Image (cartoon, rainbow, N blue to C red):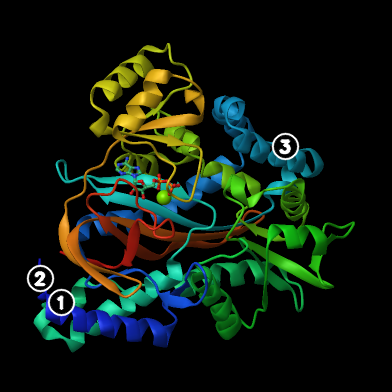
Amino acid sequence: MGRLLPGEARAARLAGQAGVWAGQRGLVVRRRGGGLTAAPLALLPTPFPRGEFERAVGLAGPLNRLVDAVSRDGAYLRRVLRGARGHDEFTARLLGVYEAVRARKGEAMHARAVGVHRSDYMVDEPTGRLLQVELNTIASSFGALGTLVSDMHRQWAGRYPELGLDPAALPANGATGHIAAALACAHGAWGGEGALALVVVQPGELNEFDQQWIQETLWERHGIETARRTLAELDRELELAADDTLSLGGAPVAVVYFRAGYSPADYPTEAEWGARLTIEQSSAFKCPSIQYHLVGAKKVQQDLAQPGVLERFLDHDEAAALRTCFAGLWSLDDAEAPATRAALADAVANPGRYVLKPQREGGGNNLYKQEMAAKLRAGQGLGAYILMERINPAPHANYLVRDGELRRMDTLSEIGIYSTYVREGDRVLLDGPAGHVLRTKDAASDEGGVAAGFAVIDSPALY
Ligand code: ADP
Ligand code: MG
């Protein structure tokens, strides 16, 4: 696989080198309690099969078109999310925003769309299949920090031949530029002189620099100024004109990029919901709109995997290509349905073969093993969950560096493929793959989020 793991002493020197790279390039995160530190990263790129990587990149376009088509089918979204709405207050609130926008704007709510998606996959070792973990339609993170880790690994491939890295095995990664270009494309389509791109952020965001790289690139390459605000601040500061123009401090807003708003914790009071509704009702491009946000629900992922559903939204070839990467997924809405009963019984008997997922984003929410089995046996509120086949990727030894500490371990990796999409009316202005990030975690950990502290940022070495 063309990669030689160095000994501890050499690895420690490389980790120092990675720290310098991180400082010089802004590959950094805020530390809880203050200050900056290098983003958690994998010292060396991790082997990943080239064919499966290319297959995942090839699915970017079909996924964009799927999200757009599903987002415009209100009857479908309502039906699929009906069970979750009854069991999960957050899903119910998001649907409430959707209904309020729908009531006021009707079909006009679909006039403009901008998507920055990240579809996450793992390659199941026993079967060799590329399987989708989830599709993120809101606040897909690590595009910029992932680009910087790719750049570092690529430099090392040329600079340190003793690592045995083939530069041709390290795919080009332009995620930062692609994400900024999508927001700039929407900004241009909106067409206002001096209009802002508004970035909606969480208070105290530790992953600020990943976002600031997008903002920096919007200015440097596109001359677009950005403003960062929390939902609470926006509730006080936003103005919505009679013609639905959104403005902040007197400047019109052309595009709103959400890096917050995906978790119940982002809405501690009614003020945050008020800001979300104001934004949704405006004429600005929303990345994502409430309907794009809803398409990313785990419940929708599960339903799309049912026989015949994809074909409603995509042509035959695209549906067939996408279906190859769907893992087993089960709804728990109707515990008496024969298929559900069979899956439940098998999951309780073989908990290691499944993952139980609530309607949440951001990592750290899933249930595994005995905790999952206990929840399934208790049987309460299962309509807000989906049951998923567990994917088992191949372990690879690597060194992970977190806040200056170097640890060698067996790791598992998950590839995220970004895709961007911009549509104005019936004109599709942008639609394609937009870079990648590999996230790598300790093989002993079930969960995988970088921000949640389980994983590090990595890049693939294709073989
Ligand atoms: P979230 O929206 O919280 O990111 P995910 O579906 O991405 O939810 O799950 C979080 C993490 O849990 C993933 O990054 C992955 O490491 C692990 N995971 C999720 N689904 C599976 C699965 N089917 N098999 C193995 N691991 C999984
Ligand atoms: Mg995830």
SS type, badge 3: helix
Q: Is residue 245 visible?
A: no
Pointer 3 residue:
99
Residue at 35%, 30% (x, y): give it. 372
Q: Position of residue 274 (x, y in %)?
A: 77, 49
SS type, badge 2: loop
Say whether disc 3 or disc 2 marks the residue closer to the N-terminus: 2
Q: Is residue 62 above or below residue 241?
A: above
Q: Position of residue 408 (x, y in %)?
A: 18, 65
Of residue 353 and residue 151, the one placed in the foreground of this image is: 353
User: Which label sits on residue 276?
Assistant: none
Most extreme residue toward the right is 242
User: Which label sits on residue 2?
Assistant: 2
CA gap, disc 3 to disc 2? Answer: 54 Å
Pointer 1 residue:
166
Query: Label 1 amino acid?
Result: Asp
Callout 1 touching callout 3 (CB < 8 Å): no
